[in-house]
Image (cartoon, rainbow, N blue to C red):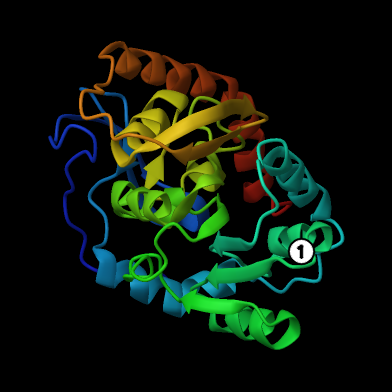
Amino acid sequence: MAFEWPMQVENCAICGENNVHKISKKGQFGEIVNVVLCKNDGFVYLSPRWNQEGYDNYYGQKYSSIFPQFDNQEEVIEEPYKLVVKRINLYLKNTPLNALSIGAGKGCVLRLLEKENENLDCYVIEPSEECRNYLFENFGYSILSDSINSEWQKGNEKKFDIIIVRHVLEHLLDPLNSLKKVRETLTHSGVAYIAVPDMMSPKGSLRRYYFRAPHVSYFSKPTLSYFLNKSGLEIIEVREEEGELWCLVKRGIVDSTKNMNIDNFSKQLHVIKKYKKTQRIPELKSFVARLIGRE
């Protein structure tokens, strides 16, 4: 059953304007997903879209049934989490004391970090009640909040040596505000690991897989860098690998002079158009398969 909630037009989170090129009206599971590309700065986002109350209801009513956290596949997906820990370890200056995972899920990264640092105190922000209970009851992790939109940063200033924000930022209506909270709560020697899907290297069918109702922002290296600079997070390393854009950052100085290059719009539009062309034959085959009942 389709989730219904009034949608509203949103201005670009970078330039604050509504000067957009329309990319798609449909996304995964046939849901209404209004993807637009800002002509001023090349930022890809959803508009019109639900407001925060609408998304809160979507996650409560539908999201967990579509993307279950407990699917008994932990042994299959452990390797990507090992890679995350390896990347973080390269930039740790001191033995970490406190680690926070935002959108922790089943806490796979925290558990791997804990194996290497037995005195590590682990904290989580996680919307799923099932996951929160699992992490507290089985591992004793401290639950900071069920939402990154809460005031969880208060009382936790400069506390965390490690913060993980893996495939979370694309879900947030206000990524800049959330990144500012990450900066506030990092220690001076701490590092944050941030990963998002890479809009410059999409994977799968745009309409039937890549574009999703819960993904409100689609970052590229230039647009993600913009938000990091504006939030006062200094990039240590940033990579585009296999459709994922990941980076390690530390506390820095807010760069109020940072502006987007106007060429980013044409570059992003070129990538989207070129990718759509490569998908024509796979999309046709998929359409035929659906017609004859093989998909």
Left or right: 134, with 251 as reference point:
right
Name the residue at 39% across, 71% down: 58
Q: Secondary structure at mark 1?
A: helix
Provide residue 234's location: percent of width, then percent of height.
Answer: 44, 32
Name the residue at 81% across, 64% down: 73
Q: Can residue 1 be seen? A: no
Considering only vertical position in the picture, is 256 above or below 274? below
Provide residue 26's location: percent of width, then percent of height.
Answer: 40, 47
Q: Nearer the viewer, residue 150 or 35?
A: 150
Name the residue at 37% across, 71% down: 155
Provide residue 35's location: percent of width, then percent of height.
Answer: 34, 41
Name the residue at 49% across, 61% down: 159
Q: Can residue 92 be seen? A: yes
**Which residue was labeled with disc 1?**
114
Location of residue 17 (image quadrant): top left
Considering only vertical position in the picture, is 283 above or below 177? above
Residue farthest right in this picture: 75
Amino acid under label 1? Answer: Glu
| Number of other residues with Cα within 10 Å of mark 1, as a class: few under 14, some 14 to 19, many 20 or more | some
Q: Nearer the viewer, residue 156 or 181?
A: 156
Q: Nearer the viewer, residue 207 or 162?
A: 162
Considering only vertical position in the picture, is 83 above or below 5? above
Left or right: 120, with 24 as reference point:
right
